[in-house]
Image (cartoon, rainbow, N blue to C red):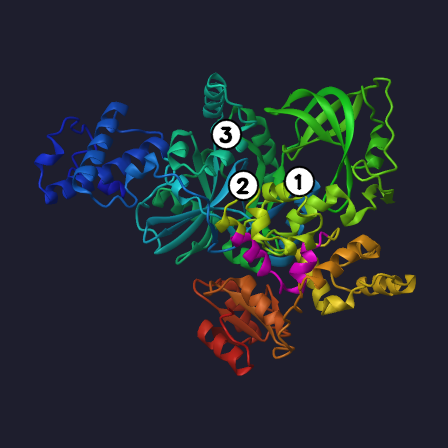
Amino acid sequence: MSDADADSESNPYLRDPPTEFEPAESLDRDDAERQASLLREAIREHDHRYYVQANPLISDAAYDALFSRLVALEGAFDLDTTNSPTNRVGGEPLEKLETVGHTAPMLSIDQSTEAADLREFDERVRREVGDVAYVCEPKFDGLSVEVVYEDGQFVRAATRGDGQRGDDVSAQVKTIPTVPLSLRGDPPGRLAVRGEIYMPKPAFADLNGRRVEAGEDPFANPRNAAAGTLRNLDPSVVAERPLAVFFYDILDSSVTPETQRAALDRFHDWGLRVADDYVEFADDVDGAIDYRDRMLDVRDDLDYEIDGTVIKVDSRDAREQLGEKSRSVRWAFAYKFPARHEVTTVRDIVVQVGRTGRLTPVALLDPVDVGGVTVSRATLHNPDEIASLGVAIGDRVRVKRAGDVIPQVVEVVEDGGGTYEFPDECPVCGSPVDRDGPLAFCSGGLSCPAQREASIGHFAVKGAMDIDGLGGERVAQLVDAGLVETVSDLYDLTVEELVELEGWGETSAQNLVDAIEETKSPSLDSFLVGLSIPEVGEATARALAREFGTIAEFPLDEDVPEDRFDAFEDRLTTVPDVGETVAHRVRDFFENEDNRAVIRSLLDHGVAPEPVETGGDELAGVTVVVTGTLQVSRSAVKELVEAHGGNVTGSVSGNTDYLVVGENPGQSKRDDADEKGVPTLDEEEFAAFLADHGVAYPPE
């Protein structure tokens, strides 16, 4: 509803509304629908004035009367309540959170607490695209979400998740008053926006007070409270919690403003809440640095948590030229605040064993409040860090939360007279500890119980073998019951064994057995990810899979000569993105006979990793640049072209063969293409070009 509508005399529920009504049952259906429509319009406007503009038109009592009247009408006449304000009260509890794909990737941004790193970012930006202006915004310490609208109506909301897919939290987000269910003005037909859901600090304190009075554990900080609330399966509980949102970016739209400034202006027009008071524009990096320093000064005065500032290139066309990396954009930078510090006493030091066998010392502390969070444990990173700090049991130490999240010990303030020596044996399995520079690792491999349980859980995650229904709690249950010692034991599980365990029925047991069976033909890269090889994530696994082709190319025999491992490590160092350190860690993994035995057992159980599809060389020598929005993501286009031997770059040059132009393209790339004589293809022509080369588009 526009401001003109809001001031119109045609809606009696906007200014000085009636608060007493005749019984709903006395109206006929047409009159009830007309009155409900006017009430919805008015309540949306009152919500916007109250929650977004902080400038209410009517009293709380009058608002409550209008809201109650709308509830009564919808109930009496069974009216459609899609995106009605009455949805704010929440609906029926959900059985679980479904996973949904994002309309566009929700990528992260590079970050640092050092001004020099921000200056480096600025130099790179100006080197690649010339002079730019920046938009400076607070970096909210909340939960990032995607909210999707179609024809101005709320459709869906999802958490960031892995950046490609997230949890569907639509039912929960619909209850948040600052999230409009219907956009104002003239919004685009398709709009996906990114926002940060948070819990205001005063509301957080009040909520924790009520939880303590009720005998419940308080939340550690506002961010944890917001995250825990948003993932609550009962939307009515979410509706009772004081969540709010700020919106700050367009992820996808049928009409995209040319600058970030224009986008934020349009957010106002559409009724999307922006942190107006603290958004500024800077012509250079010095202005961005000054902005961060001023925000640090006012940080504690805000009623919401921030942990830094975000510096964004204003021009959307320049953003397109800068492009993105696999996990982060190249046109924004988070200039973080320094971590908060407090002093406490080290009562003990314990060593944890991680999934890859890495040993991490942890200081057990006298509880201390660090930036609003009670800290009783802090990482000491590795043996060299302990030696460097000179920390021992009984010392008084200074603790900070790195990035305001992970507690760590930064210095010894007072020597307590104690000593500490890092163990030579794994505290879990007793295997010798191997040192790799400053790091320490258990040599037990997958035979170590600590690594074993964690590796089983990792084996099942998305990106690895993706075994639906095998989460951390169930893995622990299977290990405790003696049913699973290594990942290969998963393929021996039976329905009969599972139903004997607490919480399992025939259906859930059969579903898990079936899900495990369905993973017997994984791609080689997914299989490698699932093995918990140190330093090997999804990108490195894909590179290894392309280089080696099949699992048989890896050293797996029971007796492998030393020179075979030498040759294996030499070959690893030739793989793109695999340096000497990663190559050495991968060699160490395969040199461990227990690890090789687990892999052989998996293969004996019928697990047959399939080679990664590389397509071919149909597009060898072809270089394309993409501008605008296509029916598939730009990353999908890049994967498709590169899989068939081609190349996708971020800017037009003399080496570019084609510029592919989608909807709402950037002007500069088209100008560059005209200047350099580079042919342009629309999406239909691009699909035809690919078809001529034997490549199907869009990719499945």
Residue type at mark 3: give it. Answer: Tyr
323 with respect to 592 (left or right): left
Residue type at mark 2: give it. Answer: Cys
Viewer-closest of 650 and 168: 168
Viewer-closest of 301 and 566: 566
Which numbered dot is residue 304? 3
Q: CA distance from mark 2 to mark 1?
A: 51 Å
Q: Where is residue 178 shown, x and y percent of the image?
A: 38, 36
The kind of secondary structure element at disc 2 is strand
The kind of secondary structure element at disc 3 is loop
Q: Where is residue 70 shown, x and y percent of the image?
A: 21, 35
Check if mark 3's residue and mark 2's residue have beta carbons within 8 Å.
Answer: no
Magenta-drawn stretch contains 519: yes
Residue 102 appearing in the image: yes
Residue type at mark 1: give it. Answer: Asp
Which numbered dot is residue 136? 2
Magenta-drawn stretch contains 341: no
91 with respect to 122 (left or right): left
Q: CA distance from mark 1 to mark 3?
A: 43 Å
> What kind of secondary structure does the magenta stretch mostly adopt?
helix
Query: Which residue sits at x=68%, y=53%?
Result: 489
Residue 332 appearing in the image: no
Which numbered dot is residue 480? 1
